[in-house]
Structure formats: C-alpha cells, structure tokens
Image: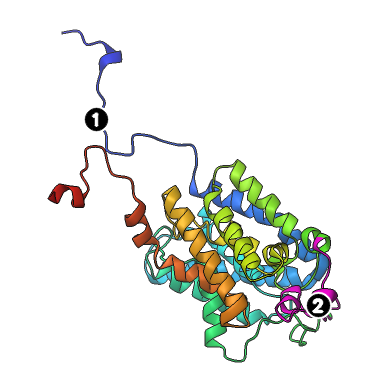
Amino acid sequence: MKVDKELQLTVAPSPHLRSPDTVSGAMRDVIIALLPVTLVSIYWYKWHAIFLVLVCLAAAALTEILFRKVMKKPVTLNDGSAMVTGLLVALCFGPGTAWWTAALATFIGIGVAKELMGGLGWNRFNPALFGRLSVILIVPLFQYVTAAFTGMRPFIGTIDVATQATPLAMMKQGLYSGMPSLGQIFLAHPGGALGETSALALLLGGGYLLYKKHIDWHIPVSIIGTVAVMALLFGKNPLYHILVGGVLLGAIFMATDWVTSPVTPKGKIIFGICIGVLLMLFRLVLAPTEGTAFSILFMNAFVPFIDRLTKRPKFGEVPAAKAKT
C-alpha cells in the first residue's frame, strides 16, 4: 500500500509548538535592557559602581557553581540567569555599600531564593529582592548607604557625588525646595541606588523589553498608575513619587519577573495595583523606608492565589460553582 508522505502522522511527546526564543536569549535581552542605567551609574559613581557590579556578578557565578556542585546538578551559568540576578542586586544598592554586603545579598538571593527552591523557574520569590531584603534584616547595622564612602575600598578613592541626601529622603522629609528638578531626576541624577540614577535609562530598557515581548504593559502600568493615584489622594506630587526611588526599577525589571508574577492579564493588573498600594503605604504611612522590595516580595507570595482566581477556564471546563447547580 502506497502512503502519501504528506499525510503521514508523526507521533512525538510535547511540546509541539516550538519557538526560537531561549532562556539564554531572554536573559541576554534583560542584560541589554539594564545596560543604560548601569552605564549612567558608572558615569556618576565611576569605579565604585564598577566595583560593586563586578563583585555581584562574581558572587552570582560562584554561588550558582557552588550550589549546583553540592546538589549534584549540572551547572547552568550559560543560561545567563545568575548574571541577571547579580546585576539586579548591584543596582539595588548604593555606591558606598560594603562589598561583602552586596556579595552576601547575591549569595542569599541565588543560593536560597533560587537554587534551594528548585532552580530557575521554580523560585517563589524574586531572587535579587529576596537577597537585598534579607541582608537588611540580617545585618542590623546595615543601612541604605549613600553618604560618603566609609573607606573599605581606599584604592578606589572617595565619593563626592553621594555626600548629599538622596532625593527620596528629601521628599519623605517634605524638603521639595532643595530637591533636584524633575528634569534632572528624569534624565540623570546621583543619589540613592545605582539603579535609581536615571528614569530615562530605565524607561529605555523597559521599552526594549516590551519591543522584544519579554514583558507586557500590565504590571508596570498598574504599579506606576497606582503610585500616581495614591500620591494625588495624599496631596503629593505624583511625578516625584514615580521618578524618585525604586519605583521604575521595581515596576519594570523586578515585578515583571516571569517566574514570580501572575500569568493572566487580569492577574497582572491585580498584582501591580496591590504592589503600588503597599509601596505608597510604606512611603507615606507605615515606615521611613522605600518599601518597593518588600511590596513586590509580599505579593510574590500571593501569585499562585491570583493565578487561580483569574485563570481562564479550559475549553469544555465547567466552573465548580456552576457544576453544583
């Protein structure tokens, strides 16, 4: 019997729909998206920023190798995820941060939040933010350092651009008259963490990720929109609250983490609104801290519930409530 080759049925395990996208390719694009703000931070903080980034990248690579070897799993440095986490950790800290603090945050983020939770794709919490917040809780004397450098790296020199109060600290104290202009903050201005030096650079990186379809608008717009609305409700300038501090870094690069954010559009909007509300409560009511890291990590814990709440019914599936009637 002659069989037409075009009519032959090929039986194979899933996946049947394939895409040219790879994990390493996606991570490479995230690194590219983070380059603008990284370069701006290097422009302002010179070797202090370079040193901090290199320490976090080295700590990220060594931590992943160590945990993978101990757990007898293949080393996956080539997927780029450890480098992304290391770079994000560096961008979460100020230029005067002690090197061991940044290295410890990276170690905790990758070792505990990622590897011990099952590795890439299984972590419940954002590794970079988990490491940052853990260090703040573990080291009681650690503070968000942006004052003059303490001298732990004398061969680099002193920091002149960071001897003033950060824009966020000034805003929280109501000192708007002494703050840099919105234009300065938007384009580039020293003060705060490395990842807070330029709103424009962060938006350019976010635009690149949107163009490459690695993220969509739901989470960033929900967070930024909620921050603006709550600022207006409390009689504050919404532009300052959006551009100052870690709102843009968190909304674009942290909250949109594929593993630790909801999968449905409705779930992403709920997720973003809740983060924005918590963030502004921290800024305006609860504590004299930024609140971005805690808000995102807190909502990471509710992602499975949000996914169940907002998931679309499968074809032919009858919701449990309707099935009982």
Label 2 or label 1, whichever comes before in sequence order:
1
* Residue at mark 1: 11
Q: Mark 2 Cα within 10 Å, few/some/many (few <14, many 20+)?
A: many
Q: Is residue 152 above or below residue 254?
A: below
* Of 204 and 139, the residue lying toward us: 204
Q: Residue at x 42, y 54 (%)?
A: 267
Amino acid type at image mark 1: Val
Residue 134 place in picture, x, y as percent:
51, 80
Residue 186 left/right relative to 276: right
Q: Mark 1 Cα within 10 Å, few/some/many (few <14, many 20+)?
A: few
* Residue at mark 2: 162
Q: Residue at x 69, y 56 (%)?
A: 202
Residue 306 place in picture, x, y as percent:
37, 59
Residue 256 place in picture, x, y as percent:
52, 56
Q: Which residues are magenta?
A: 158-182
Residue 271 left/right relative to 46: left
What is the quadrant of residue 252 in the picture?
bottom right
Q: Is residue 156 above or below residue 84?
A: below
Quadrant assignment for the N terminus: top left
Amino acid type at image mark 2: Ala
| Alpha carbons under labels 2 and 1: distance apart | 63 Å
Helix, strand or loop at mark 2: loop
Q: Residue furthest left?
A: 324
Residue 46 visible in the picture: no
Helix, strand or loop at mark 1: loop
